[in-house]
Amino acid sequence: MAKNIQMKNVDIYYGKFHAVQDVNLSIPPRAVTAFIGPSGCGKSTVLRTMNRMHEVIPGARVEGRVELDGDDIYRPEVDPVEVRRAVGMVFQRPNPFPTMSIRDNVVAGLKLQGVRNKSQLEEVAERSLRAANLWNEVKDRLGRPGGSLSGGQQQRLCIARAIAVQPEVLLMDEPCSALDPISTLAIEELIGELKKHYTIVIVTHNMQQAARVSDQTGFFNLKAAGQPGRLIELDNTEKIFSNPTEKATEDYISGRFG
Amino acid sequence: MAQSVHVTAGNSRLVRTQLSRRSLVAIAAAAIAATVVLFVATPLQGLVGFVLIAAVLYILAQTVISNHVEGRRAAINRLVTTLVVACACAAVLPLVAVLGFTIVKGLAVLNLSFLTHTMRGVAEQDPYGGIYHAIIGTLEQVGLATLMAVPFGLLVAIYLVEYSAGRLGRVVSFFVDVMTGLPSIVAGLFIFALWILALGQSFSGFAGSLALAILMLPTVVRSAEEMLKIVPDSLREGGYALGIPKWITILRIVLPTALAGIVTGVMLAIARVTGETAPLLLTVFGNPALNFNPFSGAQASLPLFVFGEAGLPNETAINRAWAAALVLIMIVLVFNIIARVIARFAGVRS
């Protein structure tokens, strides 16, 4: 079920602005890959090209190949909606749908893709909430609005919503940056469990978090403001944090800049 | 005077001398007393003049005394605060007056018979007669106009917010702005020229509702557009990221989130056109008898009825106009209440 992702000579633009230059990387299935780097270096942009969310912004485009198990997702005949069904995403700020109950939020993906079967939806809702470690907290109030939960619960609700459609890859864009340490811990534990079934890519500003949750870590940087961001190196997390190949990586993780 | 009643400052630097509530009341009483003296001593008269003069005297006295006792900053604060409150009251006053006057005048005539009879064969001085035909006409005309303008306007707003990026969006947006300022008689003339003269159709409720729909359209588009714009993009992205197609995301996630605001905008549009008289003069024409069919023949409507009756030189006719105006206000009120209930149960849950 989990798939690998390959990026080959990927360049990303917002209109005329060259945001990310020449990214080549390989993301293995059933593992956590973390992207770290200073603000504005393009880590979120690279993440968003992996499920074609990037092009939601007017004027954005991508050159090069982004392959999902060898299948280029930027071929003209590919339907971005199908790509996003295979590659789910969790955002920086929890974004539960405000008009829906907790239960409807979880099954929103299935329901709005046309699944009508009530018992199937019930079952998926419970399975997804259990997988997101949220079931015990909300099982007695599934009919309450999603917005009634705390920030950390809302973020786990969004994770439950993302895995309810059974994607093959889960992208997480700074999923803990709006959360307190206890909620962050809950989500990190969840990531550890989810990686048994999913390919996970996580962008984080928190280097300790990258060190705790990921199997491999990619460091992004840019030469100067206005220059495109680049992938400096991608390696096993232990190696990146103990003995990185590049000087810039070592400077960043040891807190000399950024 | 104020010196004797104000609170004296203590030792602390944080405490400042303040005018007490009692001294403010005293200033008000003095202002009123001075005005009474003025009205007795001079040929001044009239309630409006009295209130205005008393208010100006009060504001002047309060500012001067406050400046003396409390200092410049506090005096300016009092002056501006008083002016803001006075303006707020003055703004509500005409509204309350219009409502109160209509209710008092209208209730004197309003009864069940008035609501269930038409003006067929009723002369202007006859004490009987009613507005049943006009209520039916207004409901049908406004209903048809809403059925046309709301879906159409919503689709335009969705196009403007969710799909347009280029020149067409800007052009549409410009014309919607222009239409907002369209005089209502022009909408009536347009339908008269197009539908009745050029296409040879007869006067009808439907012709009127076409004119009303033209007037509703820009209000619906503008308000729906504003409401859709404030739906955060993160909700749209949340939908896309689940593999939900764009049109379903708009229909099932974006629109419900904006629903309460959109309903309010639609209600404003309905309320606005329900009271329109000018566009109906040339299209609906008016009819003293009941015509249930909005698609054929002249129809009555409440604003037309009010306009017609109020212009007659006869007390009973003018009273009928007041009662019809009251019914018109109540219809708009009921629309509003229904819309608010819908919006509460269908929109964002909290």
Image (tube, coloured by chain):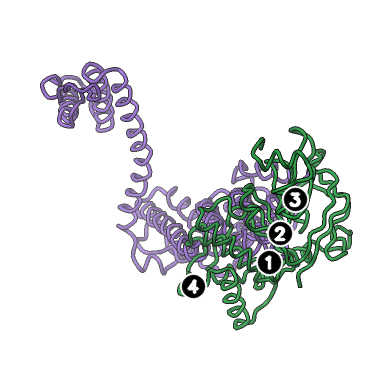
Chain colours: A green, B purple
Q: Single out the mark in the foreground, 2 or 3.
A: 2
Residue B277 x %, y % = 53, 50
* Amino acid at circle 1: Lys
Measured in 3D between alpha carbons, the distance from the residue under mark 2 to the one under mark 1, in whole angstroms, is 10 Å
* Amino acid at circle 4: Asn
Quick one: label 4 or label 1, which is nearer the N terminus?
4
Dot 3 falls on a residue whose secondary structure is: strand
Q: Single out the mark in the foreground, 4 or 1.
A: 1
* Amino acid at circle 3: Gly
B66 and B55: which one is in front? B66
Dot 1 falls on a residue whose secondary structure is: loop
Chain letter for the residue marked with disc 3 in the picture: A
Chain letter for the residue marked with disc 2 in the picture: A
Chain letter for the residue marked with disc 4 in the picture: A
Quick one: label 1 or label 3, which is nearer the N terminus?
1
Residue placed under numbered mark 3 in the picture: A218
Residue placed under numbered mark 4 in the picture: A136
Residue A10 x %, y % = 85, 49
